[in-house]
Image (tube, rainbow, N blue to C red):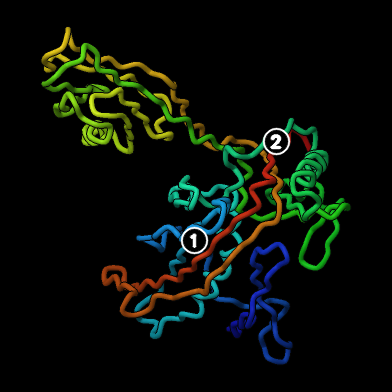
């Protein structure tokens, strides 16, 4: 016996915590949508991949004191396939699948920032900013808690003080929050502590600890002996630059270093003839110290070039394993409409006799960075 497929709701539920909840509401039993207590839905288990929908972005105009943070929207795509023999592709099915993974995609991005932290965006203040993500080095780590409930209490107290009484959000994995579900209150679609903090649990929260992006290393290059001509070179980890003029400026030194096959993203500042302050990318952490060859310099008194590490780099640390909870101030999630890429954008694979169609959606997930606390739970 074949069951009639249950139609999805016209408008998915938007929870107070701003995380999308997708559900199918069954019709009456007379419509044959329910048979023996089973509602038949010919859906698959969707997977998704993230991508950046914006290839070129211009910095927004400056607006007042430079205190605003600007965020790049990110996006995810859901792939669905069918046999080319099945006739018209069910784009509504793709739309439903794309809606269904929204909660997971948003929660995962809030926690890990896997998409947005790779795409820094300039602010009016001039500093690079990325979308806020929970498991970042900016979180203030509190002392370990003996159990989940005491961890929630400690986070709520710290965040509540930071936001001066605004709503506090506790973020955690389903496994952790489930341990204290009997102590939480359900108000509509929200879970709350007895003192009003909103508890957000989702399968998209992997429960990792803060990551550390690393500290950039700074090395200073100094020319001595007051040369009046000639050139010199720098060597980094076995690769030597093209010759650099004796009176080059910092930008020229940076260009020579970035032309090496084993370097990228290096900056250098300094006047003609130096000294030059060379800064390596933070993601590189600690790097080998460069060496210099000043044998090509002329004039002056025994001209030479020296290199000294003035600020040692610190290697980045990946997100820590373990069960972590976070607290933030108010969170904000913006979900764009679902777009389905149909013919001619869909692809047909004649070898497997299948056709592929993407469903995509842009979103932005941010939170109040003034309250950003983390705690590791060491017991139940």
Residue located 16% across and 21% down the image:
232
Between 186 and 303, the residue placed more toward the observer is 303
Which quadrant of the rendered structure holds the C terminus?
Answer: top right
Provide residue 185's location: percent of width, then percent of height. 86, 58
**Picture quadrant of residue 56:** bottom left
Q: Mark 2 points at which residue?
A: 376
> What SS does tag 1 mark?
loop
Q: Residue furthest bottom?
A: 30
Q: In this view, does 76 lie above or below 153?
A: below
**Picture quadrant of residue 18:** bottom right
Q: In screen coordinates, is 166 left or right of 195?
A: left
Q: In screen coordinates, is 350 left or right of 230?
A: right
Residue located 67% across and 44% down the image:
372
Residue located 40% across and 85% down the image:
88
> What SS does tag 2 mark?
strand
Asked if residue 260 shows in the view, the reply is no
Mark identifier at residue 73:
1
Provide residue 120's location: percent of width, then percent of height. 44, 49
Mark identifier at residue 53:
none
Q: In screen coordinates, is 186 left or right of 83?
A: right
**Picture quadrant of residue 346:** bottom left
Between 3 and 188, the residue placed more toward the observer is 188
Residue located 82% across and 48% down the image:
180
Q: Crowding at label 2, few (<14), some or many (≥20) Cα neighbours within 10 Å?
A: many
Q: Which of marks 2 and 1 is nearer the N terminus?
A: 1
Asked if residue 376 shows in the view, the reply is yes
Q: Crowding at label 1, few (<14), some or many (≥20) Cα neighbours within 10 Å?
A: many
Closer to the eye: label 2 or 1: 1
Q: Is residue 121 above or below residue 361?
A: above
* Label 2, label 1: how far apart the Cα atoms are: 30 Å
Which quadrant of the rendered structure holds the N terminus?
Answer: bottom right
């Amino acid at each position: 016996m074949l069951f009639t497929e249950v139609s999805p709701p016209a408008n998915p539920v938007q929870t107070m915590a701003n995380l999308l909840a997708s559900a199918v509401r069954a019709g009456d039993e007379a419509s044959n949508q329910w048979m023996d207590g089973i509602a038949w839905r010919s859906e698959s288990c969707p997977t998704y991949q993230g991508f950046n929908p914006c290839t070129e972005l211009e910095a927004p105009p400056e607006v007042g004191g430079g205190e605003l943070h600007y965020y790049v929207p990110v996006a995810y795509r859901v792939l669905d396939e069918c046999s080319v023999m099945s006739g018209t592709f069910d784009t509504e099915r793709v739309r439903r699948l794309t809606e269904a993974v929204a909660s997971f995609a948003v929660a995962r991005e809030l926690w890990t920032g896997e998409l947005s932290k790779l795409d820094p965006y300039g602010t009016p203040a001039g500093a690079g900013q990325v979308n806020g993500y929970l498991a970042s080095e900016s979180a203030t780590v509190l002392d370990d808690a003996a159990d989940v409930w005491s961890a929630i209490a400690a986070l709520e107290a710290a965040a509540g003080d930071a936001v001066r009484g605004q709503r506090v959000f506790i973020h955690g994995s389903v496994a952790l929050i489930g341990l204290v579900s009997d102590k939480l209150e359900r108000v509509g679609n929200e879970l709350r502590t007895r003192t009003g903090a909103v508890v957000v649990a989702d399968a998209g929260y992997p429960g990792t600890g803060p990551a550390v992006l690393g500290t950039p290393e700074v090395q200073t290059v100094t020319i001595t002996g007051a040369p009046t001509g000639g050139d010199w070179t720098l060597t980094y980890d076995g690769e030597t630059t093209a010759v650099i003029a004796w009176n080059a400026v910092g930008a020229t030194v940076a260009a020579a270093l970035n032309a090496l096959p084993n370097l990228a993203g290096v900056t250098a500042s300094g006047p003609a003839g130096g000294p030059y302050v060379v800064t390596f990318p933070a993601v590189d952490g600690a790097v080998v110290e460069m060496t210099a060859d000043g044998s090509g310099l002329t004039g002056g008194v025994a001209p030479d070039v020296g290199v000294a590490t003035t600020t040692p780099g610190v290697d980045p640390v990946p997100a820590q394993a373990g069960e972590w909870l976070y607290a933030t101030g108010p969170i904000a999630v913006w979900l764009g409409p679902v777009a389905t890429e149909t013919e001619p954008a869909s692809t047909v694979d004649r070898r497997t006799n299948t056709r592929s169609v993407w469903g995509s959606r842009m979103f932005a997930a941010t939170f109040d960075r003034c309250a950003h606390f983390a705690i590791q739970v060491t017991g139940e």
